[in-house]
Each structure stands twice: as structure tokens, then as C-alpha cells.
Amino acid sequence: MIKYRLACGNCNQTFDSWFASSKEYEKLKKKNFLTCHICNSQEVEKTLMAPKLIHGKNKQKNHLDIEKINDIKKTIKGYQKFIKNNFEYVGKNFAYEARTIHYDKKKNTKGIYGTASEKDIQELNEEGIETQLVPWFQDNDN
Ligand SMILES: [Zn+2]
């Protein structure tokens, strides 16, 4: 007896089937005797790789992705905390405030943070005003 994992091309489900031999599988396949256990489609194929492994890997990958995202979020939240403590929030006046600081060359000015459009950022860069883009999560975002 040989166990194959079959995959359905119609409903994308996989299921295990037992065959007397690989030849029997081929025979049944040729005669279209193989049908999907879920939707009865005849588009079933023997899968080449062990789907359990693939499935497991995918699961792990998703898990890692979530961990990664949480890590990144944590890092960003850390930045946010730092920025909030050390920079002055200027909201949408960011471009204006950035220019004021740059052209007035104010000394001991706290750094500022706020929101700016891509165009603002580009114009500031062209004027030699350095800005840094920080990904930002709203406070109500977990
Ligand atoms: Zn199916």
C-alpha cells in the first residue's frame, strides 16, 4: 500500500488516498477514477512534495511574519516615544517650521516632528533641509 497526498485543481484542497501501488494510482488516474473527496472534481493530482511540510513551513513563515511585524512595531513605538520626548510636535506645519529652523538658524532648537506631504519633503530636501521619514502608528493602534 502506498499513501499519496492528492491535490484538487478545482477546489485546491488536499487529501490523502491509499493505493495498492504507484501503478494503481496511474491506472485510476488514466481512467479518471480519481475524484476529489471534497468537490468530486476529477482534476486531482498527486502532489510532488509532502504538503505537510509545505503547510508547516507556511504556518511557521506566517508566524515569523507576525513576530517580525510585532518587532518592527515595537521598534517604531520606541522611536515614537523617543521622538515625542525629544522633539516638538508641529503637526501639519512641519514644512514651515522646518524652514524657520533652517533659515533662522535658531540655536538650541528642539527637533521637530509632524506631518508633511511627499512634495513638502522633496522641496525641503532640495533646499538642503534634512528630513527623515519615520513610519508612524497612531496611538490607538496596537
Ligand atoms: Zn476538489
Image (cartoon, rainbow, N blue to C red):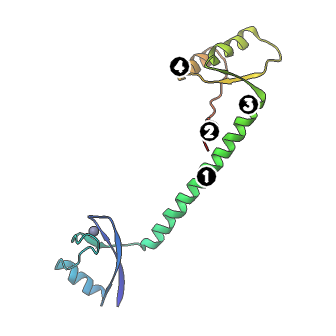
Q: Is residue 96 toward the left or the right of residue 109 in the image?
A: left
Task: Mark 3 or mark 2: name the one nearer the start of the chain.
Answer: 3
Q: Secondary structure at mark 4?
A: helix
Q: Within the displayed image, which quadrant is ligand 1 positioned in?
A: bottom left
Q: Which mark is residue 119?
A: 4
Which-is-in-front pick, marks 3 and 4?
3
- Residue visible at 36% across and 84% down in the picture: 3
Q: Amino acid at mark 2?
A: Asn
Which-is-in-front pick, marks 2 and 1?
2
Give percent across and percent down for residue 67: 61, 55
Question: Which residue in the protein does label 2 denote?
Answer: 140
Question: Which residue in the protein does label 1 denote?
Answer: 68
Distance between the Cα atoms at labels 4 and 1?
31 Å
Task: Mark 2 or mark 4: name the one nearer the start of the chain.
Answer: 4
Q: Amino acid at mark 1?
A: Lys
Distance between the Cα atoms at labels 3 and 2?
15 Å
Q: Amino acid at mark 4?
A: Lys
Q: Amino acid at mark 3?
A: Lys
Q: In the depicted view, which residue is nearer to us: 55 or 80?
A: 80
Distance between the Cα atoms at labels 2 and 1?
20 Å
The 10 Å Cα crowd at callout 2, few under 14, some 14 to 19, many 20 or more, is few
Q: Is residue 14 toward the left or the right of residue 100 in the image?
A: left
What quarter of the picture does the N terminus occupy? bottom left
